[in-house]
Image (cartoon, rainbow, N blue to C red):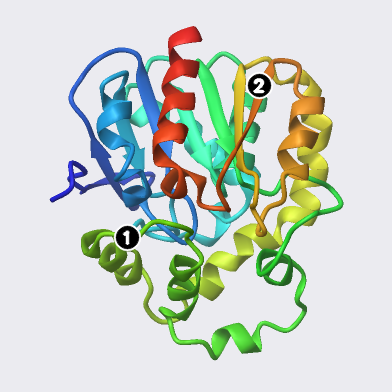
Amino acid sequence: MSDIQPRFRTIDGLSIRYAVSGGTTPAALLLSPWPESIYAYDQTWAELAAHASLVAVDLPGFGHSELREDLLSPSRMGEFVVRLADEFDLDRPHVVGPDIGTSAALFAAAHSPDRFRSLVIGSGGALSPTDLGTPLHEWVHDEDLAPYRALGPKDVVNFAMNAIEGYELPDLVRQDYLAAYQGQRFVEQMAYVRAYPAELRKLDELLPGITTPVQLINGERDSVVPVSNVEHLHGRLPNSRLDVVDAGHFVWEENAAEYARIVTTWWQNN
């Protein structure tokens, strides 16, 4: 039994899945990584909820939230992150946005500099030109999408889950990840990361002007998004801290205790 109890809410005409914890201040907005869902926080939920009032959201087009094509880029998703904070009446929340949330959260902070208390990001593409490992590099740069269209709808998420190091997903979590994939859902989602070459170039110009405090977390052995990405952000952001953790890509699950410790310590100091 998980402490995460999903529900749905219509935001900007889209069915968005979310979960909330009991209330303590400050607020924290947790964004789903890809190809997972809000259940990526299953291991850390109780510890994070002891330090903040949590609102976890499957970003539109990901997890079990409804997809809309015009939101499938980091800059547009960043606008939606601001919309989420407004819709849930969150007063300057912390944002936790690993993986695809990294670039979206940075765009949100760049364009709404006083809206968020802090960001916790990492394990997401941030470099232009891109420096990405397998299979993300191929997902971003392959010209022919036909092989991906030929995949079974659950093949990619099974591949991703099998890459999680040292942690066996609870059946509830595994089934939730799998249930999000029907038809061409994965290929449709690829538009988000395929926007990286142009979007990350725009983001790089904005980084020195982002004044929101940023905690960067990346797995030391991340073969999907190398540490070079957070090192670049650390060098470009004027107010950031970097922690490289003993883990692969899915650091929030592979080393959940350390991930939660870093996040909650950061919250206490910001």
Which residue is depicted at the point 45% across and 59% down? Answer: 61
Q: Residue furthest left?
A: 1
User: Could you say where residue 128 lies in the image, as x and y percent from the top left?
Assistant: 84, 48
Look at label 1 and name its amino acid: Leu
Q: Which secondary structure, mark 2? A: strand
The structure residue drawn at horizontal position 61% and vertical position 46%, both measured from the top left corner, is: 123
Choose between 193 and 124: the one closer to the eye: 124
* Disc 2 + disc 1, Cβ < 8 Å: no
Q: In which quarter of the view is residue 94 placed? A: top left
Taking 23 as reference, is 30 above or below it?
below
- Closer-to-camera residue (182/43): 43
Q: Position of residue 72 (x, y in %)?
A: 57, 56
Whether residue 23 is situated above or below residue 161 in the rendered picture: above
Disc nearer the start of the sequence (2/1):
1
| 120 with respect to 239 (left or right) | left
Tag count: 2
Is label 1 in a helix, a strand or a loop? Answer: loop
Label 2 packing within 10 angstroms: few (<14), some (14-19), many (20+) = some
| Location of residue 121 in the rendering, given as x and y in whole percent from the top left corner | 57, 35
Q: Where is mark 1, residue-wise? A: 169
Q: CA distance from mark 2 to mark 1?
A: 29 Å
Q: Which residue is mark 2?
A: 241
Considering only vertical position in the picture, is 24 above or below 157? Answer: above
Q: Residues within 10 Å of mark 1 (few under 14, many from 20)?
A: some
Residue kind at label 2, given as amino acid type:
Arg
Residue 204 in percent (x, y) is at: 81, 36
Residue 126, labelled with which disc? none
- Residue displayed at 37% across by 78% down: 182
Q: Quadrant of residue 51?
A: top left
Q: Residue at x 45, y 43 (%)?
A: 255
